[in-house]
Amino acid sequence: MKSKMNPAGSMTVTIDGVSHKFPLYEGAEGPKVADIRAFYQKTGAFTFDPGFTSTASCESQITFIDGDEGVLLYRGYPIDELAEDSNFLEVAYLLLHGELPSREQNVAFDAAITRHTMVHEQLKNFYNGFRRDAHPMAIMVGVVGALSAFYHDSTDINDPKQRKIASHRMIAKMPTIAAMAYKYSTGQPFVFPRNDKSYTENFMRMCFAVPAEEYEVNPVLCAALDKIFILHMDHEQNASTSTVRLAGSSGANPFACIAAGIASLWGPAHGGANEAALTMLEEIGSVDRIPEYVAKAKDRNDPFRLMGFGHRVYKNYDPRAKVMRNACYEVLDALNIRDEPLLQVALELERIALEDEYFVQKKLYPNIDFYSGITLRALGFPTDMFTVLFALARTVGWIAQWSEMIVDPSQKIGRPRQVYTGSNSRNYVPLSTR
Ligand code: SDX
């Protein structure tokens, strides 16, 4: 990947009376960056940025977010246009290759992914090692990491052909592995993928079909889930994507890197928030209990936070949350359950929070996870599968970002430093004298 940063002047830093200049650059969109790669070498000091709130870890051409304006672009295309007018595999091609596919490219990519949806028969043995009530994200971390043991012919990250096969395998097999995790939890037999089904239709069939009868996917529900997958595909350098990049920077194989991303996504502050948001709505239970929970969320001494609200980058409405809310209405209307009590709680909670001074002042808006839980539960998924679906979709973004990192000439092994405030050097004291 050739850098497309443009020089934008310089920054001068003075430490102990000595001034140091550092170049500034700007990208196609977004804030300028100060190139501080030589900061320690020049100044003898480190920069300090826990949580990387002011740090650009890389140059990327995949996804752009403007948190203040509530803008999300995949390769320049607005997320709402892609969610409304495109489909999962076409957007996956866009994220991987940078351009929307031609008709021929679309057909070829579709066929390539379809031909990799089955998993090695022996992979099934891993599921039997888990308790039936194991959290499916625990199964995903284990089974996806184990793929490294099966696909030795696509773990050489320096071979573009192997990287391409590993990327296709990962994207194609995630729905199969995820559906198997769900089936295992229900005690029902695994359902094989079928090559005559679309990506999302295949996934729904592998989750909900049983051998005893034919299964017909509801096209409205399938279209809604495909849209939900598009919304979750990528989101620039979030915690799990940064985890995948950091793991990949050591040369680890792509399957192990994706397993690391799944582990990071699981946290309730990140991808686990959709599961936590629905649990929170169920705990609130009714509209009249909302004020009690809003008060808890505002109490600095109470660790409770409104799950599905707030975001490190968005200080405006998460554009995905708007599309997700519409998808929620589509699904509930298709199932004729628009009077779903939790939706009423969610709508009223959103209304109250958006008018409350605390949330307004801290710019806390609903994020993608606020409406996804209600929607996914209406689609028939149990709560503990919500983050698995997030991981299924985000695998495309992880793979696209990992692929971009591998070919970025400026990338090195990620190795942050620290500010040490522990004990100064001291000598060992024998136990007999302590
Ligand atoms: C995702 O990074 C990404 O892009 C992630 C993601 C993606 O697609 O990859 O978008 C997916 O992870 C969405 C976020 C899902 N998480 C949740 O919904 C969990 C609830 N949200 C919070 O945990 C929080 O908002 C975070 C973790 C999302 C963001 O936290 P930050 O940016 O570190 O902000 P912060 O925790 O410093 O909060 C700033 C202030 C704090 O108050 P003060 O200490 O300044 O007084 O806002 C408060 C927080 O207490 N606050 C909340 C709140 N979120 C922040 N108060 C109540 N409820 C909340 N939800």
Image (cartoon, rainbow, N blue to C red):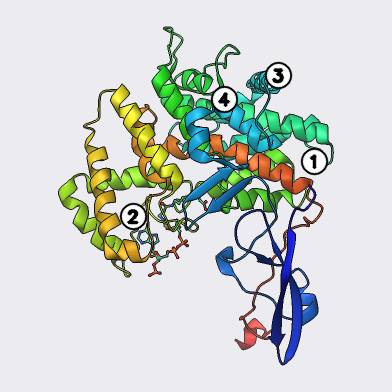
Asked if ligand 1 lies within 8 A of label 2, the reply is yes
Callout 3: SS: helix
Q: How far apart are marks 1 and 4 (CA)?
A: 24 Å
Q: Ligand 1 is located in which of the four quadrants? A: bottom left
Q: Is mark 4 on a helix, strand or loop?
A: helix
Q: Is residue 294 left or right of residue 251?
A: left
Foreground tag (2 vs 4)? 2
Gap between marks 1 and 3 measured at Cα: 27 Å
Element type at mark 1:
loop
Against 218, residue 285 (above or below) is below
**Residue 217: percent from the left, percent from the top?**
43, 15
User: Assess mark 4: CB under 8 A from ligand 1?
Assistant: no
Q: Which amino acid does label 2 sit on?
A: Leu
Question: Which badge, 1 or 4, is on the more N-terminal residue?
Answer: 1
Give the residue pinned by disc 2. 306
Give the residue pinned by disc 4: 176
